[in-house]
Image (cartoon, rainbow, N blue to C red):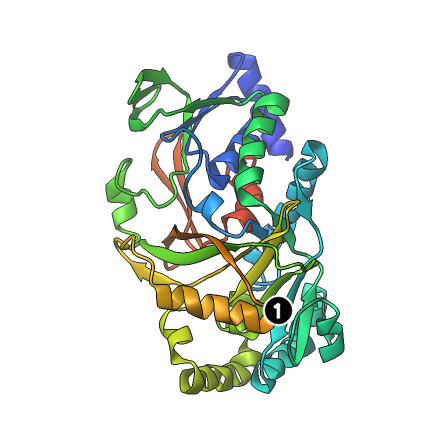
Amino acid sequence: MKHAQAQLHHRTHHHTHHRTAIVGAGIVGLAHAWAASLRGDAVTVYERNTHAVGASVRNFGLGLVLGQPHGELLELAQQTRAMWLEFLQDSACWHKTEGSLVVARTETEWRVLQAFQAVRGEAYGTRLLSRSEVAAQSAHGVGGLFSSSEIALDARQAIALLARWLAERHGVEFQYGVQVNSIDLPRLETSRGERAADEVVICSGDDFQTLYPQHFAALGIQRCALQMQRLENPGVKLGPTLMTGLSTLHYGAFTECAELAAPLAALRKEVADTEPALLEHGIHLIVQQVGDAGELIIGDSHAIAESVAPFSQASIDSLLLDLAQAVLQRPLKVLERWQGVYASGRRPFEVLQPAPSVQAVTITSGIGMSIAFALARRTLLR
């Protein structure tokens, strides 16, 4: 931080405001806008659409700490959680801090959760719940793993409110409907004419073709498409965000833990034998209750390709709905279905420097809400 303050002092001395341009108004762009504003920069965010329409508003709006592998990502998620709370308390944005509950559907899933608790429980602050304690959380399972760290947001509302908060509280300027087509500092060529900046951070989600495509090409980044649904409130009040033991096959906190290799292999075999479509489509269940109306957001599946087709499969939607109905033990009614798309790469995120004073930051693992704030501060305030 001292270094950042020295840098800030140095800049203030030379010209009143260092002009930082952010390309993209999704969670990664907003996180970098906040970080740049903390340096005292004059910050402008350019967003090609009239509002954010990408992964940030299509996912669960879940700040997930439990799923992050031990080490750097876990630390980024814990730091980001604290920053979410700062914004949420200041902005009166709807949110819940009731954690998450991984529900074991079978004895095999339960054994994975017990093994995790034994070796990682202390590090993640988790605890095991009995069948009756799971039932008290309106869920049905053999047992469960509770984490108090997760924050639930209604992503569509939270992203819009965060942008407004940055404008009102931090003086960030937003130019919507403006696409940045090329950068030659201090000049930015945009769809609405020339703009100026001293520094640029590109946070363009799964668009790697518009700016510096050759730098992205080397990374082998693809796209991941997921199927999502919003359901009517079935007359239940959920505290924690619900997941199932299937999530342990998906998240690094579990898959990168050596001691879990055997129980996870047994689970993978069980699912392959009994519900192979779940593995084939990368399906694991998250059920998040959001907003005052208490609607449920459920998902998701994972299909990875260079270009993803826009078509949703009814069979995948049915699998997700059936899983949710089994966990909640009640009929559910779908209000909306949509496709989420995010960048998917070999590493969880990429930070590139394609030109002097130009950085490109992309989160390539669907964890933007969980780590973006801390990653942005590390990128800009180091």
Q: Where is residue 117 in the image (x, y as percent from the top left)?
A: 68, 75
Three-letter code, disc 1 = Leu
For the residue pair 132 and 97, the one nearer the viewer reads as 132
* Residue 201 horizontal side relative to residue 311, left or right: right
* Residue 150 horizontal side relative to residue 257, left or right: right
The answer to whether residue 256 is seen in the rendering is: no
For the residue pair 165 and 29, the one nearer the viewer reads as 165
For the residue pair 216 and 306, the one nearer the viewer reads as 306
Residue 131 lies in quadrant: bottom right
Residue 88 lies in quadrant: top right
Q: Residue at 64% of width from left, 42% of height from top?
A: 84
SS for dot 1? helix
Q: Where is residue 252 in the image (x, y as percent from the top left)?
A: 51, 66
Q: Residue at 58% of width from left, 64% of height from top?
A: 70
Instruction: Point out the image quarter for the N terminus.
Output: top right
Q: Position of residue 320 (x, y in %)?
A: 47, 67
Residue 234 lies in quadrant: bottom right
In this rendering, the answer to whether 39 lies above or below 215 is above
The answer to whether residue 77 is seen in the rendering is: yes
Q: Residue at 65% of width from left, 48% of height from top?
A: 81
Total marks shown come to 1
In this rendering, the answer to whether 109 lies above or below 327 is below
Instruction: Point out the image quarter for the C terminus.
Output: top right
In this rendering, the answer to whether 330 lies above or below 154 is below
Q: Where is residue 93 in the image (x, y as percent from the top left)?
A: 66, 37
In this rendering, the answer to whether 286 lies above or below 340 is below
Q: Residue at 43% of width from left, 67% of height from top?
A: 318
Q: Mark 1 packing: few (<14 Cα in 10 Å), some, or many (20+)? A: many
Residue designated by label 1: 328
